[in-house]
Image: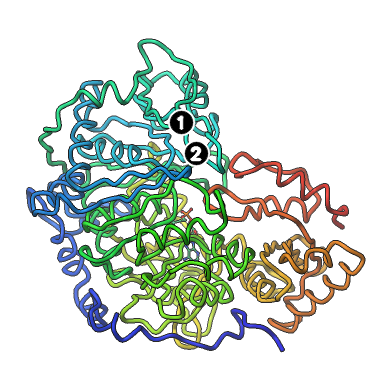
């Protein structure tokens, strides 16, 4: 009587007939890409407007430093905005923006063009030049997008820092990138209240030497400290500019942005993306992976522009494709747990792109909530950020997708810039829980420790074997770290090592198994944390689970699970019968996956520690499981979670 899990789910889902018949891309796209990879990407690049054709599609003469479309020139902002206005689509809505308190703004492509031009003129007036770095520390308001595009328009390099990050995190990023300007707001709305941003900027800028000005958007109207001569109101400086601005063309390899991401060490890495190749891949993947129809779709990436998901699939992908997007400022539970569904109904969203952690939260809240809204406009669903366990996949498919929408599980990274491994909604027969196949034109393999390609039905490491257009070009200011981090593990073969484990099933589908440091080794057997989590979440009593491998004197690693119970099971888990439930869950996993996967220990908790991008911080859970001092907690959304967990727990063995 084992429930559905990664180990046992056998159902597959073929593309809806109607969608397949009108899909942007059909099955032949794989053959086309395989026949001539570079010609395929050159064709994708021609979807954009270039002012000068490239000399060479790919220059890989100095690996791992790639040049895509070298010699070509374009303006990224022109491609995202102006050309649609010139083509007669100025009145089309670019963003239906909704603030958390319920205020709204509708921004057409023509209005966006005017605003971007004004902001570009303002940046120029403030002395920002091509190549300069501009920090953006904003809530999810349209000015965040306008600021990014204004930078792109004048060739300045934007460096967006997620608004939830601390002053410390901002300071180190300002320092490392050498930013000359910070664009921010007084605050934004979060969980029903204004949340200040300016104090963190004051703190961070006070410690930095390079920042000349702080440009402040008024959003919450809260009081702010003001440094005369340095601080400027956006409304004053941008407001008085002309809407005329001539876009300059930049080299395809001109830097577009830096996005910091945490690695295994304390110092975050500044991932550098450039212009032509990046825009080519995010634009093409956005169009093909989601079957985006510019005239009909209402597209919603429910993420923050402070992450790469927001950069590629709220800003650059959708705008380059002339999409109409929804942009939402706040949290899913404010003012009620149906807020997202209300927005889907209100704007007639047709494509929704979100993360498994959100889906599992919705599962916890119950299917009655989405059932109360009209979600029938939806036609394609997307998932990103971590493996989506089959249980969550099926729930998403049934309760949000009405059983009719393909789910596109997209594997990629800050470093890859755009989608790398995912099914295509009009082509692929979906296997719940698997990202399935490399995107056309992407060469990925599952290999063993020596880099030898593995056959079907085996587990190993994911590598990318050939450069791709939206790949990171380096780590800002540290070429050597770029080489060491991504290219040294399989240096002889010249593979990019993504840091993820992967398995190929008997049919050749790729299943991502989480970061390799999350793959446990129990008595010489490889077990994925994801696989055990999947099994636990498949049990009716469990809402969410996080699994870590804790060092164990006899087995190498032992499996320790942290579980959040569903509402109905909560009392049981806390009461006297809690021990029984824990035994039941351990046996459930043993039955589901195999005795080797039986957790050594299961701890019932109220919350799990998550980063602001929604990833469970297993490192901290491992610290608890191994009874150690807690490591760095600064990237947690809420650091009090760890105290809560510690207080509730008996000392770990
Ligand atoms: C890591 C990259 C991609 C934008 C958001 C996260 C994991 C991401 C998936 C997926 C399995 C996934 C990987 C990857 N990951 N998407 N669909 N299935 N794992 O970007 O913070 O750079 O994280 O997220 O482990 O390496 P990121």
Reply above or below: 644 against 515: above
Q: How many marks?
A: 2
Q: Which mark is residue 456?
A: none
First along the sequence among labels 2 and 1: 2
The residue tagged 1 is 220
Q: Nearer the viewer, residue 90 or 278?
A: 90
Q: In the image, residue 318 lies at what x, y percent?
A: 28, 56
Beta carbon of the mark 1 residue lies under 8 A of ligand 1: no
Q: Which mark is residue 189?
A: 2
Q: Nearer the viewer, residue 372 or 225?
A: 372
29 lies left or right of 513 = left
Beta carbon of the mark 2 residue lies under 8 A of ligand 1: no
What secondary structure is found at the residue carrying circle 2?
Answer: strand
Reply above or below: 201 against 291: above
Quarter-of-image position of residue 377: bottom left
Question: Do the residues bearing badges 2 and 1 touch, measured as CB atoms within 8 Å?
Answer: yes
Residue 58 visible? The answer is yes
Quarter-of-image position of residue 565: bottom right
User: Which quarter of the figure is the C terminus placed in?
Assistant: bottom right
What colour scheme governs how the chains and residues are painted in the rendered image of this protein? rainbow
User: Which quarter of the figure is the N terminus placed in?
Assistant: bottom right
- Which residue: 62% across, 70% down? 528
């Amino acid at each position: 009587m084992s429930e559905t899990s990664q180990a046992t789910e056998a159902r597959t889902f073929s593309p809806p007939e109607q969608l397949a018949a009108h899909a942007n891309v059909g099955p032949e796209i794989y053959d086309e890409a395989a026949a001539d990879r570079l010609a395929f990407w050159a064709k994708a690049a021609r979807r954009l407007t270039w002012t000068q054709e490239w000399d060479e599609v790919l220059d890989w003469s100095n690996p791992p430093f790639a040049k895509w479309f070298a010699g070509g020139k374009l303006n990224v902002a022109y491609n995202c905005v102006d050309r649609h206005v010139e083509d007669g689509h100025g009145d089309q809505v670019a963003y239906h923006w909704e603030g958390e308190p319920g205020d709204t703004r509708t921004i057409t492509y023509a209005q966006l063009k005017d605003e971007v031009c004004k902001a570009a003129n303002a940046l120029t007036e403030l002395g920002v030049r091509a190549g300069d770095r501009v920090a953006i520390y904003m809530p999810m308001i349209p000015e965040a997008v306008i600021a990014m595009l204004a930078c792109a328009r004048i060739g300045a390099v934007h460096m967006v820092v997620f608004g939830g990050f601390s002053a410390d995190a901002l300071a180190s990023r300002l320092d490392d990138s050498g930013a000359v300007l910070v664009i921010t707001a007084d605050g934004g709305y979060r969980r029903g209240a204004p949340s200040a941003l300016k104090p963190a900027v004051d703190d961070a800028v006070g410690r930095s030497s390079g920042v000349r000005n702080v440009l402040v958007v008024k959003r919450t109207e809260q009081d702010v400290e003001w440094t005369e001569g340095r601080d400027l109101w956006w409304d004053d400086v941008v407001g008085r500019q002309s809407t005329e601005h001539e876009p300059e063309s930049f080299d395809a390899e001109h830097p577009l942005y830096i996005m910091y991401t945490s690695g295994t060490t304390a110092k975050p890495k500044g991932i550098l993306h450039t212009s032509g190749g990046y825009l080519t891949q995010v634009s093409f993947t956005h169009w093909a992976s989601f079957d985006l129809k510019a005239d009909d779709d209402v597209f919603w990436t429910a993420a923050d522009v402070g992450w790469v998901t927001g950069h590629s699939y709220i800003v650059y992908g959708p705008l380059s494709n002339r999409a109409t997007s929804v942009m939402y400022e706040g949290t899913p539970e404010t003012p009620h747990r149906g807020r997202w569904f209300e927005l889907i109904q209100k704007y007639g969203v047709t494509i929704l792109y979100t993360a498994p952690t959100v889906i599992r939260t919705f599962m916890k809240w119950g299917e009655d909530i989405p059932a109360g809204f009209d979600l029938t406009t939806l036609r394609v669903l997307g998932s990103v950020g971590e493996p989506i366990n089959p249980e969550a996949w099926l729930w998403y498919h049934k309760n949000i997708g009405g059983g009719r929408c393909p789910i596109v599980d997209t594997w990629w990274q800050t470093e890859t810039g755009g989608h790398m491994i995912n099914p295509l909604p009009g082509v692929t027969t979906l296997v719940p829980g698997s990202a399935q196949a490399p995107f056309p034109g992407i060469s990925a393999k599952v290999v063993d420790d020596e880099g030898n390609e593995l056959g079907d039905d085996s587990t190993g490491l994911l590598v990318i074997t050939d450069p791709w257009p939206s790949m990171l070009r380096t780590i800002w200011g540290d070429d050597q770290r770029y080489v060491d981090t991504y290219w040294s593990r399989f240096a002889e073969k010249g593979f990019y090592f993504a840091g993820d484990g992967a398995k190929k099933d008997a049919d050749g589908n790729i299943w991502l198994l989480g970061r390799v440091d999350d793959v446990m080794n129990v008595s010489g057997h490889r077990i994925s944390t994801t696989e055990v989590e999947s099994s636990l979440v498949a049990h009716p009593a469990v809402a969410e689970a996080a699994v870590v491998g804790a060092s164990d004197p006899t087995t190498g690693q032992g499996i320790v699970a942290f579980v959040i119970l569903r509402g109905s099971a909560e009392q049981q888990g806390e009461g006297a019968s809690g021990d029984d439930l824990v035994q039941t869950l351990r046996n459930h996993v043993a039955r589901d996956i195999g005795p080797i996967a039986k957790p050594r220990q299961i701890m019932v908790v109220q919350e799990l520690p998550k980063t602001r991008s929604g990833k469970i911080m297993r490192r901290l859970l491992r610290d608890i499981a191994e009874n150690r001092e807690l490591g760095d907690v600064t990237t947690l959304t809420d650091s009090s979670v760890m105290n809560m967990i510690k207080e509730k727990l008996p000392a770990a063995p």
